[in-house]
Image (cartoon, rainbow, N blue to C red):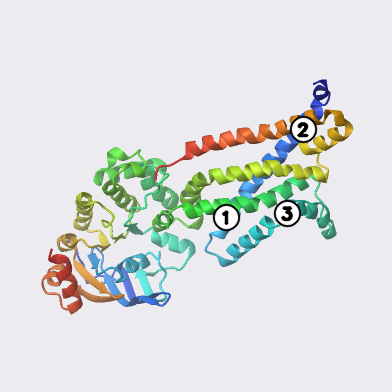
Amino acid sequence: MSFLADNFTLLRDAFLTTLSLAVVSGVLALLLGTILAAMRVSPIPALRALATFYVEVFRNTPLTVVFFFLAFGLVYVDLQFPSRFITAVTALALYTAAFVCEAVRSGINSVPPGQAEAARALGLDFRQTLTTVVLPQAFRTVVPPLGNVWIALAKNTSIAAGFAVTDLTAVLQRLANASADQLALVFVAVVVGYLMITLPSAWGIRVLERRLAIVR
Amino acid sequence: MTSRPNGEPLVRLSGVNKWFGELHVLQDIDLEIARGEVVVVIGPSGSGKSTLCRTINRLEAIDKGEITIDGQRLPEEGKQLARLRSDVGMVFQSFNLFAHKTILENVTLGPIKVRGTSKAEAERRARELLDRVGVSAQADKYPAQLSGGQQQRVAIARALAMDPKVLLFDEPTSALDPEMINEVLDVMTGLAREGMTMIVVTHEMGFARRAANRVVFMDGGRVVESADPETFFTRPESDRAKDFLSKILNH
């Protein structure tokens, strides 16, 4: 146990790094994904095509490849991110936004078309219809699938370890190499770190789902 | 009733055509509705009467022809279309109240978002309208907690809150249980008496006789006959209308 105590600061910082990777890229992915979903249902064909293209590119590219491209590929166009953390957040957010978009779009499609028609008949424009009538109802049905996307994102942050971000997985590698005799303990510590993010999320999602449920 | 047929028509459709793929659902429709006029559109299902109603606020786009409201051509897109729609109230067959908003919020949403009315003023007016349609006690409930008849009366209040120039009713009682139909028709009859311009797609012949200035009979995407209710129900001209009336009135 003293082994854990000795490495407490390292583990705590790694945990906080993993948590911030997940939270920051999660918020960005939620925003970008919602905008993409709005584009996919918009009346303008060019916007629909652009969003569809985005989703198909990022949903079908391995996350590691996205990381690789942002970490090394962009140098060719003379662009470099100010820190590895920002590179990792960008990769995670761009990738996850594609999944958020599809979840939100399925939620939008679950809202009966009469709701948007009634809003338009009152004189609300496309943006108002979407933000005041359709999306609030869509998000309610989208909480469970978005929860899945969030948990996947929390675990996907581990890929940042391969790109020199000192997160939980990176610490796992480092400590396991340095003290092979403590492998089991290190594993448990790191897994508990991930569970501390994902388990409360699963619980929060259930609460949110119940809170937002509407009678139809 | 306050029909003023010699004034500038409030709603004018000229040479309106619409296709759903191969199906020619509206064929050369010419129709004028005067200010304060109540027009009931009847016809067999598939005759195009609902589509006609939905083209007037452009929930359905037309392929040919022109629709003007208060002398203004129906805009095709964007802000102007939204502004014009705010002057054309619509009541749907399936009510379409906003499921995530309370009854009061359903009625205040349009005035607040579209007209920029203050919340307090919008709520005062909404309560007045809810009182008028007889559901003021339900103001803080959600739509799903109300009966169909109550929901439809709220939908009418929601449309009225925008002070529309004309109200469209797309089969407003077709989704209701029989004992709730009259409570909705009573509200509509009241509006007709007060001089509201109304276009009503319905199967309620009693309402047509009682409240309409004119009955428009449609079949196969065309306006087959257009007459005052008395003439239409007692001396229909076309065979198609005679046939239709014999089927719905003799039971």
Tell me if residue A77 comes above or below residue A138 in the rendering. Answer: below
Whichever of labels 1 and 3 marks the residue nearer the N terminus, that label is 1
Whichever of labels 1 and 2 marks the residue nearer the N terminus, that label is 1
Residue under pointer 2: A187
Question: Which disc, if any, is residue A62?
Answer: 3
| Numbered disc total | 3
In the rendered image, residue B123, in percent from the top left (x then y), is placed at 36, 42
Front: mark 1 or 3: 3
Residue under pointer 1: A37
User: Residue at the location (28% across, 72% down)?
Assistant: B32
Q: Residue furthest right?
A: A178
Front: mark 1 or 2: 2
Left/right of residue A111 with respect to residue A33 in the rendered view: left
Are the residues tagged 1 and 3 within 8 Å (C-beta)? Answer: no
* Amino acid type for the residue under numbered disc 1: Ala
Q: CA distance from mark 1 to mark 3?
A: 21 Å
Question: Which disc, if any, is residue A45?
Answer: none
* Amino acid type for the residue under numbered disc 2: Phe
Classify the position of the N terminus of chain B by image quarter.
Answer: bottom left
Are the residues tagged 3 and 2 within 8 Å (C-beta)? Answer: no
Tell me if residue B236 comes above or below residue B141 in the rendering. Answer: below
> Which picture quadrant has residue B135?
top left
- Write down the chain letter for disc 1: A
Crowding at label 1, few (<14), some or many (≥20) Cα neighbours within 10 Å? many
* Amino acid type for the residue under numbered disc 3: Pro
- Write down the chain letter for disc 3: A
User: Which of these two is toward me, A125 or B124?
Assistant: A125
